Image: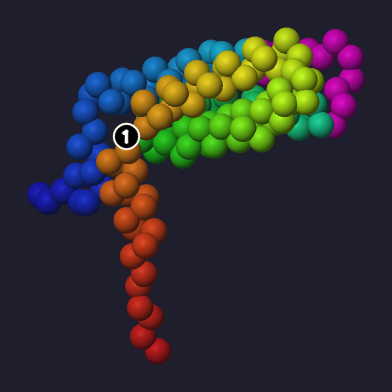
Protein backbone atom coordinates (compact mmCIF):
# COMPACT_ATOMS: atom_id res chain seq x y z
CA UNK A 1 0.00 0.00 0.00
CA UNK A 2 1.45 3.35 -1.06
CA UNK A 3 1.70 6.31 1.28
CA UNK A 4 0.31 9.61 0.14
CA UNK A 5 2.51 12.71 -0.05
CA UNK A 6 0.82 14.14 3.06
CA UNK A 7 1.52 10.96 5.02
CA UNK A 8 5.17 11.04 3.93
CA UNK A 9 5.48 14.69 4.97
CA UNK A 10 3.91 13.97 8.33
CA UNK A 11 6.28 11.05 8.90
CA UNK A 12 9.23 13.40 8.46
CA UNK A 13 8.39 15.16 11.71
CA UNK A 14 10.32 13.53 14.51
CA UNK A 15 8.69 12.37 17.72
CA UNK A 16 10.76 15.02 19.49
CA UNK A 17 9.39 17.77 17.22
CA UNK A 18 5.82 16.56 17.80
CA UNK A 19 6.50 16.51 21.54
CA UNK A 20 7.78 20.12 21.38
CA UNK A 21 4.67 21.16 19.48
CA UNK A 22 2.38 19.40 21.95
CA UNK A 23 4.23 21.07 24.81
CA UNK A 24 3.67 24.50 23.27
CA UNK A 25 -0.03 23.78 22.69
CA UNK A 26 -0.35 22.61 26.31
CA UNK A 27 1.54 25.61 27.69
CA UNK A 28 -0.64 28.01 25.75
CA UNK A 29 -3.81 26.14 26.67
CA UNK A 30 -3.04 26.13 30.39
CA UNK A 31 -1.74 29.70 30.40
CA UNK A 32 -4.77 31.12 28.66
CA UNK A 33 -7.86 28.90 28.82
CA UNK A 34 -8.69 29.07 32.50
CA UNK A 35 -8.18 32.82 32.77
CA UNK A 36 -10.10 33.65 29.58
CA UNK A 37 -13.04 31.31 30.17
CA UNK A 38 -13.32 32.33 33.82
CA UNK A 39 -13.46 35.99 32.79
CA UNK A 40 -16.22 35.25 30.26
CA UNK A 41 -18.27 32.85 32.37
CA UNK A 42 -17.97 34.67 35.71
CA UNK A 43 -17.43 38.37 35.04
CA UNK A 44 -17.35 40.62 38.07
CA UNK A 45 -19.19 43.28 36.11
CA UNK A 46 -20.55 43.68 32.57
CA UNK A 47 -17.78 43.42 29.98
CA UNK A 48 -17.34 46.19 27.41
CA UNK A 49 -17.41 45.08 23.80
CA UNK A 50 -13.67 45.44 23.02
CA UNK A 51 -12.68 43.52 26.14
CA UNK A 52 -15.37 40.98 25.26
CA UNK A 53 -13.94 40.58 21.78
CA UNK A 54 -10.43 40.07 23.16
CA UNK A 55 -11.46 37.53 25.79
CA UNK A 56 -13.76 35.69 23.36
CA UNK A 57 -10.84 35.39 20.95
CA UNK A 58 -8.46 34.20 23.68
CA UNK A 59 -10.93 31.66 25.05
CA UNK A 60 -11.60 30.24 21.59
CA UNK A 61 -7.92 30.31 20.70
CA UNK A 62 -6.98 28.52 23.92
CA UNK A 63 -9.63 25.87 23.28
CA UNK A 64 -8.26 25.26 19.79
CA UNK A 65 -4.74 25.06 21.24
CA UNK A 66 -6.09 22.31 23.50
CA UNK A 67 -7.14 20.42 20.37
CA UNK A 68 -3.59 20.95 19.07
CA UNK A 69 -2.28 18.76 21.89
CA UNK A 70 -4.00 15.83 20.15
CA UNK A 71 -3.47 17.01 16.55
CA UNK A 72 -0.21 19.00 16.54
CA UNK A 73 0.35 19.05 12.79
CA UNK A 74 -3.24 19.83 11.80
CA UNK A 75 -3.37 22.77 14.22
CA UNK A 76 0.01 24.22 13.16
CA UNK A 77 -1.59 27.40 11.74
CA UNK A 78 -2.48 28.33 15.33
CA UNK A 79 1.21 28.58 16.13
CA UNK A 80 1.64 30.85 13.09
CA UNK A 81 -1.20 32.99 14.43
CA UNK A 82 0.46 33.20 17.83
CA UNK A 83 3.80 34.12 16.26
CA UNK A 84 2.16 36.78 14.08
CA UNK A 85 -0.04 38.45 16.66
CA UNK A 86 2.53 38.53 19.44
CA UNK A 87 5.29 39.82 17.15
CA UNK A 88 2.87 42.41 15.76
CA UNK A 89 1.90 43.56 19.26
CA UNK A 90 5.52 43.75 20.43
CA UNK A 91 6.66 45.72 17.38
CA UNK A 92 3.55 47.74 16.57
CA UNK A 93 2.17 48.54 20.01
CA UNK A 94 4.84 48.07 22.67
CA UNK A 95 7.76 49.77 20.90
CA UNK A 96 5.79 52.97 20.15
CA UNK A 97 4.53 52.93 23.77
CA UNK A 98 8.12 52.60 24.97
CA UNK A 99 9.28 55.43 22.71
CA UNK A 100 6.51 57.68 24.07
CA UNK A 101 7.29 56.62 27.68
CA UNK A 102 3.76 55.23 28.08
CA UNK A 103 4.65 51.68 29.11
CA UNK A 104 2.64 50.38 32.04
CA UNK A 105 3.72 47.45 34.22
CA UNK A 106 1.04 45.34 32.50
CA UNK A 107 2.38 46.26 29.04
CA UNK A 108 5.94 45.49 30.15
CA UNK A 109 4.86 42.11 31.48
CA UNK A 110 2.93 41.27 28.30
CA UNK A 111 5.89 42.36 26.18
CA UNK A 112 8.09 39.73 27.83
CA UNK A 113 5.35 37.13 27.41
CA UNK A 114 5.29 38.02 23.70
CA UNK A 115 9.07 37.85 23.34
CA UNK A 116 9.13 34.45 25.06
CA UNK A 117 6.28 33.16 22.90
CA UNK A 118 7.87 34.39 19.67
CA UNK A 119 11.17 32.71 20.54
CA UNK A 120 9.40 29.45 21.48
CA UNK A 121 7.28 29.58 18.31
CA UNK A 122 10.38 30.03 16.15
CA UNK A 123 12.05 27.07 17.87
CA UNK A 124 9.00 24.78 17.81
CA UNK A 125 7.70 25.41 14.28
CA UNK A 126 8.95 22.66 11.94
CA UNK A 127 10.26 25.05 9.30
CA UNK A 128 11.22 22.40 6.71
CA UNK A 129 7.73 20.93 6.95
CA UNK A 130 6.24 24.43 6.63
CA UNK A 131 8.33 25.13 3.55
CA UNK A 132 7.40 21.83 1.87
CA UNK A 133 3.72 21.83 2.80
CA UNK A 134 2.75 25.51 2.83
CA UNK A 135 5.25 27.60 0.86
CA UNK A 136 6.01 25.31 -2.10
CA UNK A 137 2.35 24.42 -2.79
CA UNK A 138 1.38 28.09 -2.53
CA UNK A 139 3.56 28.88 -5.54
CA UNK A 140 2.47 25.90 -7.64
CA UNK A 141 -0.17 27.20 -9.97
CA UNK A 142 -2.31 24.85 -11.99
CA UNK A 143 -3.18 25.82 -15.52
CA UNK A 144 -6.83 25.62 -16.38
CA UNK A 145 -7.67 24.43 -19.85
CA UNK A 146 -10.55 26.16 -21.52
> Whole-percent x and y of residue 122?
40, 29
Quarter location, residue 41: top right
Q: Residue at x 28, y 49 (%)?
A: 132
What residue range appears in magenta? 35-49
Q: Nearer the viewer, residue 73 or 96?
A: 96
Q: Which residue matches tag 1?
A: 126
> Whole-percent x and y of residue 84?
54, 37
Q: Nearer the viewer, residue 140 or 111?
A: 111
Q: Is residue 40 above or below residue 14?
A: above
Left/right placement of residue 145 relative to residue 10 reads right
Q: Nearer the viewer, residue 97 or 80?
A: 97
Q: Is residue 117 magenta?
A: no
> Whole-percent x and y of residue 54?
73, 29
Residue 70 appears in the figure: no
Q: Is residue 34 above or below residue 134?
A: above
Quarter location, residue 36: top right
* Mark 1, secondary structure of its residue: loop
Which quarter of the figure is the C terminus placed in? bottom left
Q: Is residue 41 magenta?
A: yes
Q: Residue at x 32, y 56 (%)?
A: 136
Q: Residues within 10 Å of mark 1 (few under 14, many from 20)?
A: some
Amino acid sequence: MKSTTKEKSRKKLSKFRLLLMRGLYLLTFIGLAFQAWEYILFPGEPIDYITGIAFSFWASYATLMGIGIRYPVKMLPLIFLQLAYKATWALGIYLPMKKASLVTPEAESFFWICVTAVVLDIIVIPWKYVFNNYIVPFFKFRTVSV
